[in-house]
Image: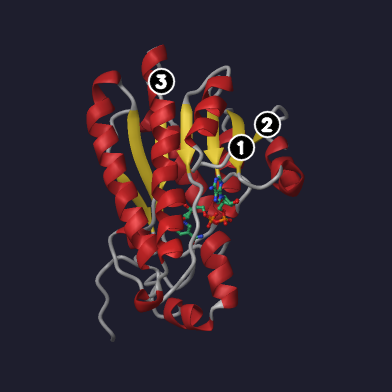
Amino acid sequence: MLTGKTAIVTGGAGDLGNAMARHLAHNGAHVVIWDIVPQVEAAAAIKRVRAHDPGVEYAEVDVRDRAAVDRAIADLPQLDIVCSNAGIVDAQPFLEISAENWRKHLDINLTGCFNVCQAAARRMVAEGNQGRIIMTSSWVAEIPWPEITAYTVSKAGVNMLVKQMARELAPQGIRVNAVAPGIVNAGLAGRQLREEPQYAARVAKAIPLGEPGRPEEIAEAVVYLASPQTAYMTGSILTLDGGCSLFQFDS
Ligand SMILES: NC(=O)c1ccc[n+]([C@@H]2O[C@H](COP(=O)([O-])OP(=O)(O)OC[C@H]3O[C@@H](n4cnc5c(N)ncnc54)[C@H](O)[C@@H]3O)[C@@H](O)[C@H]2O)c1
């Protein structure tokens, strides 16, 4: 389905990004993983993708560094699909959020997306390539969740970035959408589930379908957003959250 396409996945050494990379490669795409961790530390994650794309590439790129992002985009022989997925969460109650905590969420989760997606879109437009841009948002972009204000605000910004880019790039045929995972038992939420008892207690009551999601489910949604089936879709936020964002009554 994606044979002949080249896809970047930022944060591709992490749990959700790595699943995206594997599933894109499994569907025929050539994958380029970007992450901030040194290649040696990402060896296992790269190996998992190599099973599907023997030529998978890895580059150490900090999405906050615009010059590095521009260089890495220019270095690619081809670019068709961008998964702007790198992200962090560092929970702090609202009254205790430090300037540094606030800034790092916006720098990585929002400005990082802007850097990668604008650089990629510029290249797609210059080449006349009607590419696909897929950001990783979150169900909490729309729903306040305790102690992660900087994170939810950054993801709300991602949703509007998707819509702005979709609107302005539609004439060039570039589709811009997001996948919005719920609580996945891996990556950022997986760590919170293991390390923050108050988070696990809240989660136990928050998922109408009763259990956390899996990275593979999010990755399949990304493949869908990259595929010809979604050629008529742009500016959409595809939510996979087990019903978390439905209004909930205690019953
Ligand atoms: N896990 C969940 O339940 C969940 C839910 C909703 C949304 N998300 C989103 O999914 C995305 C992936 O997160 P994950 O859960 O797989 O976590 P993860 O920590 O496993 O992966 C995130 C990756 O991003 C990389 N990264 C961090 N800062 C970077 C930077 N400046 N430049 C480049 N790479 C950087 C990390 O090294 C890591 O490999 C994030 O955007 C996150 O907000 C996750």
Q: Is residue 1 visible?
A: no
Label 3 environment density (alpha carbons within 10 Å; few <14, some 14–19, many ≥20): many
Label 3 and label 1: CA atoms lie apart by: 19 Å
Per the image, the residue denoted by label 1 is: 33
Secondary element at image label 2: loop
Label 3 and label 2: CA atoms lie apart by: 21 Å
Check residue 1 in the rendering and tell me which mark sits there, or answer none: none
Between 24 and 199, the residue placed more toward the observer is 199
Between 179 and 229, the residue placed more toward the observer is 179
Label 1 and label 2: CA atoms lie apart by: 8 Å
Between 203 and 93, the residue placed more toward the observer is 93
Label 2 environment density (alpha carbons within 10 Å; few <14, some 14–19, many ≥20): many
Give the residue type at disc 1. Answer: Ile
Per the image, the residue denoted by label 3 is: 124
Secondary element at image label 1: strand
Q: Is residue 15 visible?
A: yes
The picture places residue 9, in percent across and down from the top left corner, at 54, 38
Cβ at disc 3 under 8 Å from ligand 1: no
Q: Identify which residue is drawn at 30% across, 69% down.
A: 144
Q: Identify which residue is drawn at 40% across, 76% down.
A: 96
> Disc 1 vs disc 2: Cβ atoms closer than 8 Å?
yes
The picture places residue 165, in percent across and down from the top left corner, at 29, 34
Cβ at disc 1 under 8 Å from ligand 1: no
Q: Quadrant of residue 156?
A: bottom left
Per the image, the residue denoted by label 2 is: 56
Front: mark 1 or 2: 1
The picture places residue 177, in percent across and down from the top left corner, at 34, 39
Tell me how many marks there are. 3
Q: Farthest residue toward the front? A: 99
Give the residue type at disc 3. Answer: Met
> Disc 3 vs disc 1: Cβ atoms closer than 8 Å?
no
